Structure formats: structure tokens, C-alpha cells
Amino acid sequence: MLDFFLVDNHLTADPNDCRAITQHKKTITMDQLIKLIMLRSAGLTESEISSVLKEYFVALEYFLEEGNRITTPYFNITPTVCGVFEDKKASFEKGKHRIKINVTAGVQLKKVADNIGTEKIRGNKNVPYVDDVYDHASDSMDDVLTPGKPIRISGEFLKLDPQDVAQGVFFVNMADQAESRADMYMESRNKQLSLMVPDTLVSGNYSLKIRAHMGSEIRVGEFSSPLTVS
């Protein structure tokens, strides 16, 4: 079951309508996927499964680097060129232009979405909630993090005390769960945060968490989409 609760919708003119805030139970890692495969497939070892998955991703990278689009029942991957070119004679320049990887759900994954049950829960506590994350350096939304460069976070209940190290925006490496806290904040308001991404982040996928003091406790909100440092 996918849990959700409703809050006022400030994105429309209707004063009565609401929007759903999803609460995921866990973030599942590659190791947990491998362990489940082991339980379902007697005789396969962890190293065998890990090796096959690694080769699968190597194959994906190979075909993408060759300029291909990949289509599978579970996902579609399409590389695209982004950026402004001065005229038709202009060439691709790193730093000025970039390759963006777009991932969309495949036919089978769309069927999975249709089968996910939902449960409405009471939203009796305010927690930081992120609508979107804009990375200024890459001019991208909900996709890329650029170490040492600014991002803008929009949402609800975001205001925090940057001087309190227990509060803040934290970037969690999804590979090893290592946390990095943002130290430089330019803006801290209820609906918007502006800050610098730590320049120590290494390549990988990250979850973004916000810890803010509300009432007598620290409450935590997590962005629903992973963000990538390339």
C-alpha cells in the first residue's frame, strides 16, 4: 500500500481543493533487491546475481555511449542534447551544452503502477515537503546536482535554522547511505530554500532529506525522486 495524506493545494485558485503528499515506507537499495532475488531463486549466490546485474548495467552504458535509445518492458532511456547553440554552425561545447538522460516508465512498469494500492492516512504532523529541486548550473529540475553550485528547493514547511547542525538539507548517497550536510544557505523560508550543494559529493545517486525544528522536535522530509551527481 502506498500511503498518502492531503494538504491544501496552493497551486490553484480553488480555496477548497487539496493535493496528496506521498509517504514512502522505505528506500530500497541494490543490496536489498539482490537479497530478494536470492530468496526467490534457490541456488543463485549473491555474487552470481551481483555479477549479472553489473554486466546488465555495463551493457546499458555501452549502448547509451554509442548514441542509442534503450527500450525495455520496465523503462525507456533516451539521451538528449541540451543547451543553446548560437547558430546552425555551432558545435557541442562541454560546460555550455550537456547530455541529459531521460528515463520513463515502460509498458510493464505502467501496469505495476495500476496495481499499487493506496491508503489515506492522517496528516496530523507537518513535515518538510519538497515539490521540486532546481539545479542552477545544469538548468535542470528534479534531476541533477552540481557539487559546489546553488540549488533552489520549493515546497512546504521548509524553513530551518542553518546555524543548528541538527537541522538542514542533507544529501544521502544511496550506495552507502553516507550523509553530507549543506553548510551554505542563501535563503530559508517556509516555501523555499536556496543553498549550495556540498562540493564533496562524489558521483552517484542521492536522496535529499530536510530536517527542520517544528514545535518540540526535529521532523524529517525526503524528496520523492533521486538526484544524480555525474
Image (spheres, rainbow, N blue to C red):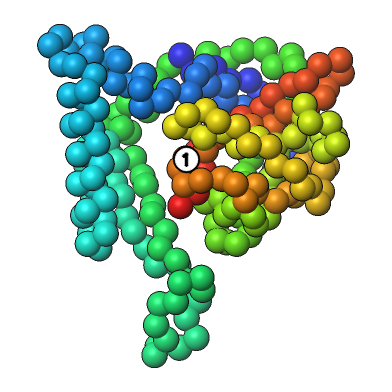
| x, y percent for residue 90 | 42, 86
Residue drawn at the location 22% of the way across and 62% of the way down: 66
Q: In this view, does 167 lie above or below 55?
A: above
When asked about the image quadrant of residue 99, the answer is: bottom left
Q: Seen in the image, is 196 located left or right of residue 186? A: left
Residue drawn at the location 86% of the way across and 15% of the way down: 216
Which residue is identified by label 1?
A: 205
Q: Is residue 71 above or below residue 45?
A: below
Q: Seen in the image, is 52 located left or right of residue 117? A: left
Q: Seen in the image, is 64 located left or right of residue 221? A: left
Nearer-the-camera pick, 65 or 23? 65
| x, y percent for residue 5 | 63, 20
Instruction: Tell me, yes or no, if residue 223 can be seen here.
Output: no
When asked about the image quadrant of residue 88, the answer is: bottom left
| x, y percent for residue 210 | 69, 32
Residue drawn at the location 55% of the way across and 30% of the way down: 178
* Amino acid on which disc 1 is placed: Asn
Q: Residues within 10 Å of mark 1 (few under 14, many from 20)?
A: many
Instruction: Tell me, yes or no, if residue 23 can be seen here.
Output: yes
Judged from the image, the secondary structure of the residue bearing numbered disc 1 is: strand
